[in-house]
Image (cartoon, rainbow, N blue to C red):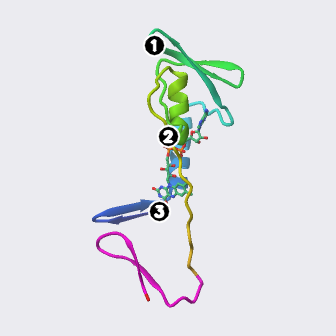
Amino acid sequence: MAALWAPTAGQISPWDAVFALIENSITNGVKLHLATEVKGVRIRGKRVLGLEANGSFFEADWVINAAGSYADKIARMAGVDGYNIKPRKGEYLYLIGMNLKLIGYFSQRQHLSLKA
Ligand SMILES: Cc1cc2nc3c(=O)[nH]c(=O)nc-3n(C[C@H](O)[C@H](O)[C@H](O)COP(=O)(O)OP(=O)(O)OC[C@H]3O[C@@H](n4cnc5c(N)ncnc54)[C@H](O)[C@@H]3O)c2cc1C
């Protein structure tokens, strides 16, 4: 795994980092359930009992909601209302290989500047 360190910013490979975490977790006994969509959160009173997914019930003392832009949906399954995540569409433009006479660089203010 490679990494870059700079005084005001850092960069790592997100894929390598996640795979390393998964491999280490499995080595330490974690069971990974891929393609398993959480359809419901079973609660009793204010306690989480577990998750409903793929027609099975996964008992759990603790549930961490890490569903990204669907985290509001999972929260609602657990009876937590009051916030909605509104994803936005965006575009990436790659100028690599194009002869545009533009020089892109990260300035000390950490934003991408373009010089004509
Ligand atoms: C095109 C693009 C480029 C990006 N580039 C960068 C970048 O260069 N640098 C950077 O720092 N950030 C970048 N980001 C942002 C970064 O990807 C996110 O901030 C980050 O992935 C959020 O991580 P997360 O674990 O919270 O959620 P996610 O990575 O979205 O993970 C949520 C997971 O929950 C799963 N899930 C959702 N609902 C359910 C359900 N009901 N049951 C089971 N699983 C469920 C999803 O399948 C997903 O695997 C980029 C995002 C996009 C879209």
Q: Which residues are magenta?
A: 97-115
- Asked if 12 appears above or below 43 in the picture, the reply is below
Q: Which residue is labeled 3 in the image?
A: 2
The mark found on residue 85 in the picture is: 2
Q: Quadrant of the C terminus?
A: bottom left
Graded by Cα atoms within 10 Å as few (under 14), some (14 to 19) or many (20 or more), the crowding at tag 2 reads few
Graded by Cα atoms within 10 Å as few (under 14), some (14 to 19) or many (20 or more), the crowding at tag 1 reads few
- Asked if 8 appears above or below 89 in the picture, the reply is below
SS for dot 1 = strand
| Residue most extreme to the right | 55
Residue 93: image location, x then y, percent: 56, 71
For marks 2 and 3, give the CA distance: 33 Å
Q: Please name the amino acid that badge 3 sits on.
A: Ala
Comparing marks 1 and 3, which lies closer to the viewer?
1
Q: Which residue is labeled 1 in the image?
A: 47
The mark found on residue 5 in the picture is: none
Residue 41 image-quadrant placement:
top right
Residue 22: image location, x then y, percent: 55, 42
For marks 1 and 3, give the CA distance: 41 Å
* Residue in view at x 47 percent, y 25 percent: 81
Q: Please name the amino acid that badge 1 sits on.
A: Arg
Observer able to see residue 54: yes
Q: Please name the amino acid that badge 2 sits on.
A: Ile
Q: Who comes first in sequence, dot 1 or dot 2?
A: 1
Residue closest to the eye, 41 or 60: 41
Q: Who comes first in sequence, dot 2 or dot 3?
A: 3
Residue closest to the eye, 34 or 77: 77
